[in-house]
Image (spheres, rainbow, N blue to C red):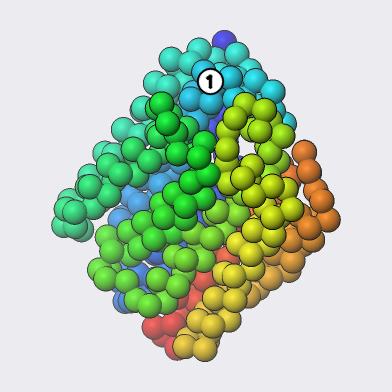
Amino acid sequence: MATIAQWIEGARPRTLPTAISPVVAGTGAAIGAGVVAPGRAVLALIVAIALVVGVNFANDYSDGIRGTDDERVGPLRLVGSKVAEPTTVRAIAIVSFSIAGLAGLTLVSLSRQWWLIAVGIVCIAGAWFYTGGKRPYGYSGLGEVAVFVFFGPIGVLGTVITQSGPPTALAVVTCVGVGMITCAVLVANNLRDIPSDTVVGKRTLAVVLGDADTRRLYVALVTVPLLLSALAGLRSWPMLFGLLALPLAVGLTRQVLSGADGRKLIRVLAQTSVLLLVWSALTAVGLALGQIV
């Protein structure tokens, strides 16, 4: 039986910045539009965290029963390591998705944006079928596309819409940046797993591109959001705050381009999550101050 510490590790807490960042950025945009709605922001955060925890356990379950995680470098996988029953891990994933659904329904009822119920259903389905089902799209090189859509436009703009209504142009720019850096987190993970994924037939985008091009893709994904900060700063100078994340981005690109692999990429993955949160928080401040200055 898995210990409490192993269950916590199985939830992959290092990935939580991917849940927090879209909500932080979207809330900053809502404040910039003149709306302060802390209750709705908290509900959006519950939805995001529950979905990310749910997808982590769902991936653990689906990859574990396929044998994908039998031989890998990285944090503990509950099913792959045989420290937890697959049905238990699946049940916890379902509970997490249910929490996300209940919080999401509450948020929709408050904002009266009923069409977002359909978006929520798509998000839960996307979370499950990333590695679940007979033809998981995460095994076909589509993971990065899904991550961009779910954590960028849906995560950021959904937060804005439920708090302040239609998003501004700067919010749209922000959602692109959040989506790209979140993709970089996944790319770092899949770059590390190229050898093991190749063996088990998991054709992630990293496997398709190969090691060298995947490293170039990573650099592009962490660089373009900083360029967006600079361009957005031409319209609203507080958006330049996002550029304060530049030193962290430079350090990460150097590690990846220098050939970091295996456990070194675990550190890169964690630091990329930090970059995501830092850039999102700084940009949120820029969005919030844009209305004032």
Residue drawn where x is 44% and y is 65% of the image: 175
Count of numbered tags:
1
Q: Nearer the viewer, residue 236 or 118?
A: 118
Tell me the quarter of the picture where residue 69 sits.
top right
Residue at (53% x, 26% y) in the render: 63
For this rendering, which residue is in front, 182 or 35?
182
In this view, the residue in front, 114 or 197, is 197
Q: Position of residue 193 (x, y in %)?
A: 68, 37
Quadrant position of residue 226: bottom right
Quarter of the figure with residue 252 = bottom right
> 56 or 21: which is nearer to us?
56
Is residue 65 visible to us here?
Answer: yes
Q: Which residue is mark 1?
A: 66
Quadrant the N terminus occupies: top right
Q: Residue 221: where, in percent of width, then height?
A: 60, 62
Residue 50 visible in the snapshot: no
